[in-house]
Image (cartoon, rainbow, N blue to C red):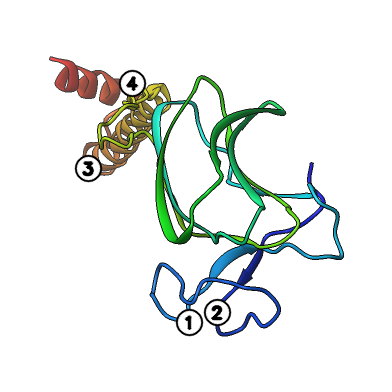
Amino acid sequence: MDKLDWELTSPEAEKHYSVPAEDKTLGTERGHFLFFPSSNRTAVKDNAMLLSPHLPPTKGTCLKFWAYKPDSSDSELKVWRLSKGLLYQLLVVSELSGPWRRFDVNITSTEEYQIAFEGIKGVSGAVALDDIEYTIGVNCAKMITDVKVPSKRNNAGGVAAAVIVVLLLIATLIALLVYYLRTRSGTQPCAIFIIFFRYWFQ
């Protein structure tokens, strides 16, 4: 699907390419961000894909991220929804003209999907990403869109276990009663059972 990779770097560590003077999270040159460089060693239009984990179907999930693309960069950034091997375009980031800019994207999907960030190499310049987050089931207007229906648990196993425990307790009580009465009065077992059950179930 892609030929290149997104790189994790920082302004302090990057010596070969023009990058933001600071990251978005910390606002310092030591902060890190994801970076898609444009190198003479790779062909124009080569791409790099950054994929999220598999996410459940949604009626509205908000994707938030910050992007950086200087005027000197002719590289492209596209955001896709990937479902069953098919790409559905969500956003194209073309001209940003300088500093970090935030984007909010509402995602809807009737099937499991992934979020895909695609960097497409230009002749020069770079693209950077930072603070990528998404809230499953909450759209960008902060409205809950996906209501989870509690699953009904099957309690048959628990009921059966409780019945077995009760029966074991009854059997233990019968055994103790038989032993006690036989040692005390010499009563026959069958008579003991009759006495016990009359007492228990009356």
* Disc number for residue 11: 2
Element type at marker 4?
A: helix
In the image, 180 versus 135, the foreground residue is: 135
Element type at marker 3?
A: helix
What is the crowding at mark 4: few (fewer than 14 residues within 10 Å), some, or many (at least 20)? few
Q: Position of residue 32 (x, y in %)?
A: 52, 73
Q: Position of residue 46 (x, y in %)?
A: 80, 49
User: On the image, which quarter does residue 140 sit in?
Assistant: top left
* Disc number for residue 190: 4
Q: Position of residue 61 (x, y in %)?
A: 40, 34
- The CA span between labels 4 and 1 is 90 Å
Mark before the other along the chain sequence, 2 or 3: 2
- The CA span between labels 1 and 2 is 5 Å
The residue wearing badge 1 is 29
In this view, the mark in front (1 or 3): 1
In this view, the mark in front (4 or 1): 1
- The CA span between labels 4 and 3 is 16 Å
Q: Residue type at mark 1: give it.
A: Glu
In this view, the mark in front (4 or 2): 2
What is the crowding at mark 3: few (fewer than 14 residues within 10 Å), some, or many (at least 20)? few
The residue wearing badge 3 is 184
Residues under numbered marks 2 and 3 in contact, where contact means CB atoms less than 8 Å apart: no
Q: Residue type at mark 2: give it.
A: Pro
- The CA span between labels 1 and 3 is 90 Å
